[in-house]
Amino acid sequence: MFIRLSAAIAALSLLGSAALAQGAKPTDPQIAHIAYTAGVIDINAAKQAIAKASNKDVKAFAQDMVRDHEAVNKQALDLVKKLKVTPEDNDTSKTLSKQATEKLAELNKLKGAEYDKAYVAHEIAYHKTVNGALETQLIPSASNAELKSLLQTGLKIFQGHQQHAEQIATKLK
């Protein structure tokens, strides 16, 4: 079940675009699109969890994910409008979206405690991957200071999400 998640993690951590394979770093419009897409993916997973989770802590966590990721994505949209930059779809964001759809379908087949554990495990892995990509690839590659600052703020929030999910996971065992 977690094989597809691993593929999504690999895609994000490698930032699977052909340009990167040739040694080029992602552009700010590509970074903006990847970061926004990653937020949308987590919002969609959280909305599913709000509807399906049976554990009150899992539901509350999912509500936090929606609130926080929507807020960061709103800031990102405001920034790209201010900078007059159009986020650029790319191989990484396309791959992430496709694999997220598959993961949501897998999670949707689960119920009760099994769903809760799988969702929280997914959130831990997803946040580890996104945080790693932010730290090692997206933030260092961003050339605009405001974009870099927003990504750094997002990283702090998302590190907190990972820790929160890890705490919930220990209670679900």
Image (cartoon, rainbow, N blue to C red):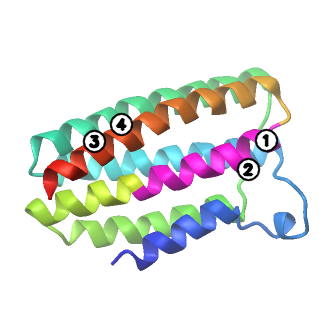
The C terminus is located in which quarter? bottom left
Spot occupied by residue 60 in the image (x, y as percentages of width and height): 20, 36
Q: Which residue is mark 1?
A: 140
Main SS, magenta residues: helix
Compute the Cα span from label 3 to label 1.
29 Å
The N terminus is located in which quarter? bottom left
Where residue 109 sits, quadrant-wise, is bottom left
Mark 4 vs mark 1: in front = 1
Q: For residue 135: magenta?
A: yes
Spot occupied by residue 94 in the image (x, y as percentages of width and height): 62, 63
Looking at the image, do the residues carrying marks 4 and 2 touch, with CB atoms under 8 Å apart?
no
Compute the Cα span from label 4 to label 2.
25 Å
Q: Which residue is mark 4?
A: 66
| Amino acid under disc 2 | Gln
Mark 4 vs mark 2: in front = 2
Residue at 26 percent of width and 43 percent of height: 167
Looking at the image, do the residues carrying marks 2 and 1 touch, with CB atoms under 8 Å apart?
yes
Compute the Cα span from label 3 to label 2.
27 Å
Judging from the image, what secondary structure is the residue with disc 4 in? helix
Q: For residue 170: magenta?
A: no
The answer to whether 123 appears left or right of 130 in the picture is: left
Judging from the image, what secondary structure is the residue with disc 3 in? helix
Compute the Cα span from label 4 to label 1.
27 Å
Residue 62 image label:
3
Q: Earlier in the sequence, mark 4 or mark 2?
A: 4
Spot occupied by residue 133 in the image (x, y as percentages of width and height): 64, 51
Q: Which residues are magenta?
A: 125-142
Judging from the image, what secondary structure is the residue with disc 1 in? helix
Q: Which residue is mark 2?
A: 137
Q: Residues within 10 Å of mark 4 (few under 14, many from 20)?
A: some
Residue 100 image label:
none
